[in-house]
Image (cartoon, rainbow, N blue to C red):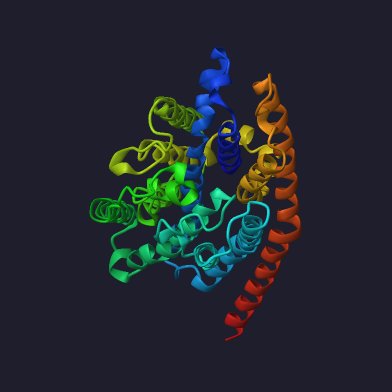
């Protein structure tokens, strides 16, 4: 699923570089579907909620103390911050050099807000740097990291534990409802004016176009659906069955149909309550697939192949560096992606293949030389913390 999300977002950004007026008629639908690869962001949020919630549900069901929040925070920081800070700083330096943006308080303020993972709360800082749009989602996700253990605090109280496993999952649905209420209040009572609104005004105009429908509380509802899926998955029998294969296939078909139905509408796939990416149908379908695939007989093994493992491994680096590569290519080589060519489609294909190779090379370097060493260091600190706790 992580590999699918990674490739969806990459295909989305490549498709945005194609002049759709030059797409042959028989390729129009594939290109329009590729345009909706931004739904991969929703897959990332559901997947993160699923994976990070599992240790909490397992501890809850076994009547154990909640996972260490210190270790939880250390793992999240080690996984996200080194790569994010490096890409953020690179994007900032490119903004004031290659892209020619003025080094003023506005740009510096956006960078600082992004550096401290606080850029998600205002349209002016929504995109912390120029030339690396996907970085907007990292502070959104870190907000979810903070809200997740807060949501579990109630469930770990002794009165709640006595209620059993199913009531805990029902209470989590209540948490999703609270997040949706918070999103509705933000959208309803914190509107933005129309001055400078729209992508023609650059990143900040685009941010003003997205907000307030794009807000961390609404995205936590997507994240929390993944958390609910983890709670359900830990209740399922551990034995495998072909029925899980069939159900998982149906879930993924529903997700694909939801994307197909979005074609022709807004590029962000605004749905219920204005939440993007086909909410709640698409994230619920992804959550269902995550629930079912671990118990599948064949489908899980097919999807969990060496290629998907590699893509998943380097996916974070691919995600945070792809726009830097694509924007830099277009800036340094204006003719890239078929611009001004008699063969626009051919030029787009060649540039896309070259960009993909470069992006995956950088993503691989980022993982093995930056992300993995920091994660390994954090795990060593984690083991030292556990030994100290045991001795105490």
* Residue at x 45% of width, y 68% of height: 66
* Residue at x 28% of width, y 52% of height: 191
Q: Could you tell me if residue 61 is visible in this image?
A: no
Quarter of the image with the C terminus in it: bottom right
Q: Compare residues 344 and 5 and report the one nearer the observer.
A: 344
Residue 366 at what x, y percent from top left? 71, 55
* Residue at x 38% of width, y 46% of height: 197
Quarter of the image with the N terminus in it: top right
218 left or right of 362?
left
Residue 11 at what x, y percent from top left? 59, 34
Residue 140 at what x, y percent from top left? 46, 56
- Residue 266 vs 176, above or below: the answer is above
Tell how many labels: 0
285 left or right of 376?
left
Q: Could you tell me if residue 79 is visible in this image?
A: yes
Q: Residue furthest bottom?
A: 392
Q: Compare residues 307 and 200 and report the one nearer the observer.
A: 200
- Residue 26 vs 107, above or below: the answer is above
- Residue 67 vs 141, above or below: the answer is below
Residue 2 at what x, y percent from top left? 58, 44
- Residue 262 vs 229, above or below: the answer is above
Q: Quadrant of residue 247?
A: top left
């Amino acid at each position: 699923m992580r590999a699918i999300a990674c490739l969806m977002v990459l295909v989305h950004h490549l498709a945005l570089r194609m002049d759709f007026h030059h797409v042959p008629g028989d390729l129009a639908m594939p290109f329009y579907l590729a345009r909706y690869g931004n739904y991969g962001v929703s897959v990332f949020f559901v997947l993160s909620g699923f994976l990070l919630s599992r240790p909490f549900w397992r501890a809850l069901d076994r009547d154990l103390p909640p996972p260490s929040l210190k270790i939880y925070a250390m793992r999240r920081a080690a996984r996200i911050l080194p790569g994010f800070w490096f890409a953020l700083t690179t994007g900032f330096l490119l903004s004031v050099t290659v892209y020619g943006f003025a080094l003023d308080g506005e740009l510096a303020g956006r960078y600082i807000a992004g550096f401290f993972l606080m850029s998600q709360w205002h349209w002016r800082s929504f995109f912390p740097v120029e030339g690396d749009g996907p970085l907007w989602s990292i502070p959104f996700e870190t907000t979810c990291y903070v809200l997740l253990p807060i949501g579990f605090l109630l469930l770990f109280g002794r009165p709640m534990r006595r209620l059993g496993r199913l009531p805990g999952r029902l209470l989590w649905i209540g948490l999703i409802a609270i997040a949706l209420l918070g999103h509705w209040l933000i959208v309803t009572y914190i509107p933005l004016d129309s001055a400078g609104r729209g992508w023609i005004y650059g990143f900040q105009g685009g941010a003003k176009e997205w907000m307030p429908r794009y807000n961390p509380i609404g995205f936590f509802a997507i994240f929390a659906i993944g958390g609910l899926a983890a709670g359900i998955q830990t209740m399922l029998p551990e034995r495998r069955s072909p029925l899980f294969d069939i159900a998982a296939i149906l879930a993924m078909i529903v997700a694909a149909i939801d994307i197909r139905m979005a074609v022709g509408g807004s590029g962000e796939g605004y749905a219920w309550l204005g939440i993007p990416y086909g909410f709640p149908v698409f994230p619920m379908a992804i959550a269902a697939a995550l629930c079912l695939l671990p118990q599948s007989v064949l489908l899980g093994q097919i999807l969990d192949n060496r290629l998907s493992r590699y893509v998943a491994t380097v996916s974070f680096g691919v995600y945070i560096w792809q726009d830097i590569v694509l924007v830099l290519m277009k800036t340094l080589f204006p003719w890239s992606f078929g611009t001004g060519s008699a063969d626009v489609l051919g030029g787009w294909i060649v540039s896309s293949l070259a960009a993909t190779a470069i992006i995956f090379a950088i993503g691989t370097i980022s993982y093995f030389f930056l992300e993995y060493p920091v994660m390994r260091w954090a795990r060593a600190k984690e083991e030292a913390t556990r030994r100290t706790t045991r001795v105490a």
